[in-house]
Image (cartoon, rainbow, N blue to C red):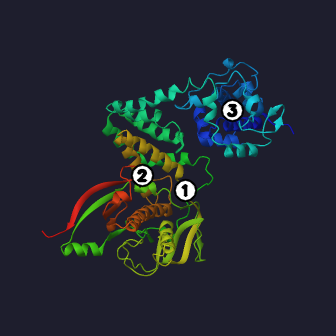
Amino acid sequence: MVMGTEELLRLTVAALMARTGERQNVVAEALGLSQAQVSRKQAGRQHWSLEDVDGLAAHYGLHVLDLLAGPTHAVGVLHGSIPPLRPVDVAAPPVQLPRGRAQQLPVQRPATPALSMVLPCVLCGQPTSDEIEGFPQHLSAEECAAAIATAPVPAPQQPAAEPPAPAPEPKPQVEAEPTPAVEPDAPDAPAEPAAPAAGPRAPRTYASGSLVDQITGRVHEALEECSGDLEAAQAALLKGAIPDVMKFFKASRVGGRYEHSEFPPTAEVLRKRSQKGADEIWEGRPKWRNPHVFKAAKQGEQFEVTALDMNAAYLSAFKAWLPIGQLREDTSGVHDRKKSGVHLITPAEWEHTDLPNPLGNRMEPGELWVSESTLRLLLDCARDNLADAPTIHRSLVSGGTEVLLEKLRRALAEVRKDALAEGDELTVNYVKSMYSKLVSTLGESTANRDMRRPDWMHIMRAKAFANLWMKANKIHKAGLQVVEISGTDELHVIGDWRTVFTEGRDMNQVKEKSIYTLGGKS
């Protein structure tokens, strides 16, 4: 069977990516595309255009004819074991590459082929005893992948051994030094957000570079529209936070595995009883004080208490199990961890007086509706022998996933982290407004017209409360005393909390709000 040109191109791109150790997001950035677009093109769900072919050839330093001659030929030309069909100097001009990537591109080809010395596969560069068309080559892509996976870090060794490698090596050092120089530019408000996009985020292994650039680009646009006026730019960004975050969310779902429902029918238990009333879902919002500590304080004992603040509580809650489609009734009474929704339960008794109840400050006994996050927390407590498992009477569930908001969460977290490092409070406040408003408007709010998922709202809010409870439990397990826990992010403790948590403003850190004295005679 004769292979089509586009199918041959897909194999060539896959081989070049494997040979250079690049991922789709790197190729996407070089072509001005999103990672999802490259994924669809490689999967055959979207066509590679002639413009894309020119960009690919320029990215890898190949002539278009060498790129279209098949994976064996293209990779052979890439590392110098096969002569090119046409000089590379007549190829399309190279595209602008991200910082930190230039020295990794295989444009520098050795004058003397190393093939006769180490017999690397022309597709993946790992040793092989097989041969195809006169060149060492694994017999399948699976063999290449296995060879790469078991290789003892071959990629960094090859550039170090090649003669041209020393020339690019000073470039990362020169580029690494100007990153502190970004800080002196801080007084220039319009230039401040622009600096992080070019500097410290070169690898972009944590979040989608395209999505990160969209978020920071929106900040740049607001500053330009407001002529550098920080207050006016912040007002504009906060005003547009809801439509912006929904736009970024939709961009993060391009090429995703799941097609979620945006306006599924709302179950009766998720409907508000009145315009200003609430529905039937209990989120487990904590509001608890340690009775033993406060009793001792009234009796004259004195305690030094530290009030801690959890960072980006609602952003962390994006990593929650969310239902994908319409909720369906399940009366089996068994929790399926691959599904998500809301559940009618009877919780077990909570007998720990020195640790808050994971259900929050609920006093009424009997059945209640809880979200997925609360039920999972109660089941985790049962596995830790803190209480019996709740009884599940009825569930409204759909197939669920924990990664529905993961790309958006990572992008917002990366932008927030970079902005904090640079003292860019404008971007920090913009990100905070987006993630907090997304959670609060997913229900029946008229402020968000792009989606109505009250089940998601309850699950994410309850996840923030569950995360706070787990931090309190961590303090308790470390032998410290939990004094108070309330809201989404407030935890008061007695003892050296720095042995448990790291201090800072990052998402995996906590801040010290205040230190106060509890008790003692006046």
- Judge the density around disc 3: few (<14), some (14-19), many (≥20) Cα neighbours within 10 Å: few
Q: Foreground: 199 or 398?
A: 199
Q: Which mark is residue 49?
A: 3
Nearer-the-camera pick, 141 or 412: 141
Q: Position of residue 37 (x, y in %)?
A: 63, 40
Residue 421 left/right relative to 17: left
What is the secondary structure assignment of the residue under circle 2?
loop
Which residue is under mark 1? Answer: 262
Near mark 1 (Cα within 10 A), the count class, few <14, some 14-19 or many ≥20, is some
Q: What residue type is labelled 1?
A: Glu
Task: Give, as a three-letter code, the residue at label 3.
Answer: Ser
Q: Reading the chain from its start, which is encountered first: label 1 or label 3? A: 3
Label disc, if present, on residue 389 of the rendered structure:
none
Q: Nearer the viewer, residue 342 or 101?
A: 101
Comes first in the chain, label 2 or label 1: 1
Q: Which of marks 3 and 2 is in front?
A: 2
Query: How far from the left and from the top, in percent, is residue 367?
Result: 46, 79
- Can you tell which quarter of the image residue 134 is in? top right
- In which quadrant is the C terminus drawn? bottom left
Badge 2 amino acid = Met
Residue pointed to by mark 2: 507
Q: Distance between the residues labelled 3 and 2?
A: 41 Å
Q: Furthest residue to the right? A: 1
